[in-house]
Amino acid sequence: MQVYLPIAEMSVDALLLLGIGFGVGWLSGLFGVGGGFLLTPILILIGIPAPVAVASGANQTLGASVSGLIAQWRRGNVDARMGSVLLVGGLVGSALGVQLFALLRRLGQVDLAVAIFYVVVLGTVGMLMVRESVRAIWRRRRSGGTATKAHEHTWLHGLPFKVRFRKSRLYISVVPPLLVGFGIGVLSAVMGVGGGFMLVPAMIYLLGMPTSVVIGTSLFQVVFVSANVTLLQAWQVGSVDIVLTLLLLAGGVAGAQFGAAMGTKLRGEETRALLGLLVLAVALSLGWDLVRVPESLFTIGPAR
């Protein structure tokens, strides 16, 4: 069933978009990520212009993340205080990121910049997550199932302005969470992602949060940052396709509930390993698309 996307100016199979939305929503509930790191490149690969894919991807991320957040909140897996600190940095970062995205669009370099951002960021994060998760699983097996610490205290934990985050069992400075939130906000705006694929490992390895509350707290921050990005993209760039967004949302909201239920059955290191492999696979796919020889070296098509 073909539907016309007015902003993207093309027709796409509605069932395909519903399926993509469901899959991304499932990832949102399972891993605590918005899913935009997978959604945006998939939309680009099926022919959606990069500016529309980025802006509409952020919108779909919002809906899927809200559904996942509700499921995690009911399970008591959200540290609202930590999420609020991350959110402050995220809102500032996303506002600046939208300005950077608008500049890249005026220069005509959005497609290339988005692709390079994805390959570099996803490739780095994916390799680090897979390596650490394999080590954690190996340590657990060697110790006979005894739990090991997921982090060590560094100079970051000695910074001033300390606050006690009871849900996360932490007493640390608010500076690291603010900086993490700021970086995720910039990425959300430029890459059309919720930022959970980077936020989750940052919360575990930099902030030292327990995995049990990371997924829900990540979704807390992703929801509000994605909402901010969506509003700014629609207002300043005008590239949010409402038809595309609604179809993706319809599948995403349902998928997030299934993912949240399945996520309770996995160990923390297993969840991180699966997420790392998925992130790495997306990076390799985009990297190959950048370097492979196109089927037609010279084509004429509509400007994006």
Image (cartoon, rainbow, N blue to C red):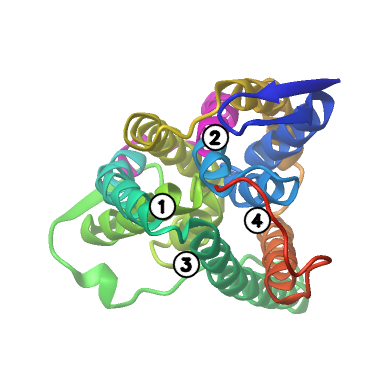
Which callout, 1 or 3, points to the residue nearer the camera?
1
Tell me if residue 152 comes above or below residue 194 in the rendering: below
The x and y percentages for residue 281 are 74, 65
Are the residues tagged 2 and 4 within 8 Å (C-beta)?
no
Label 4 – label 3 distance at C-alpha:
13 Å
- Cα separation between marks 1 and 2: 16 Å
Asked if the residues shown at circle 1 and circle 3 are in contact, with their CB atoms under 8 angstroms apart, the answer is: no
Q: Name the residue under label 2.
A: 56
> Residue 262: x, y in percent?
76, 37
Asked if the stretch drawn in magenta spans residue 71, the answer is yes
**Residue at 48 percent of width and 44 percent of height:** 218
Q: What element carries label 4?
A: helix
Q: Quadrant of residue 254?
A: top right
Label 4, residues with CA under 10 Å away: few <14, some 14-19, many ≥20: some
Name which of mark 4 and mark 1 comes first in the sequence: 1
Instruction: Name the residue type under label 4.
Output: Gly
Image coordinates of residue 22 in percent, x first then y, are: 75, 31
Task: Measure the C-alpha gap from mark 2 to mark 4.
Answer: 31 Å
* Extent of the magenta region: 58-82
Residue designated by label 3: 205
**Left or right of 186: which side holds 25?**
right
CA gap, disc 4 and disc 1? 39 Å
Q: Residue furthest left?
A: 160
Q: Which residue is disc 1 drawn over?
A: 105
**Mark 3: which amino acid?**
Tyr
Q: Mark 4 points at which residue?
A: 268
Look at discs 1 and 2 and give the one toward the viewer: 1
- Which of marks 2 and 1 precedes in the sequence? 2
**What residue is shown at x 38% (from left), y 61% (from top)?**
207
* 292 w.r.t. 194: above or below: below
The CA span between labels 3 and 2 is: 30 Å
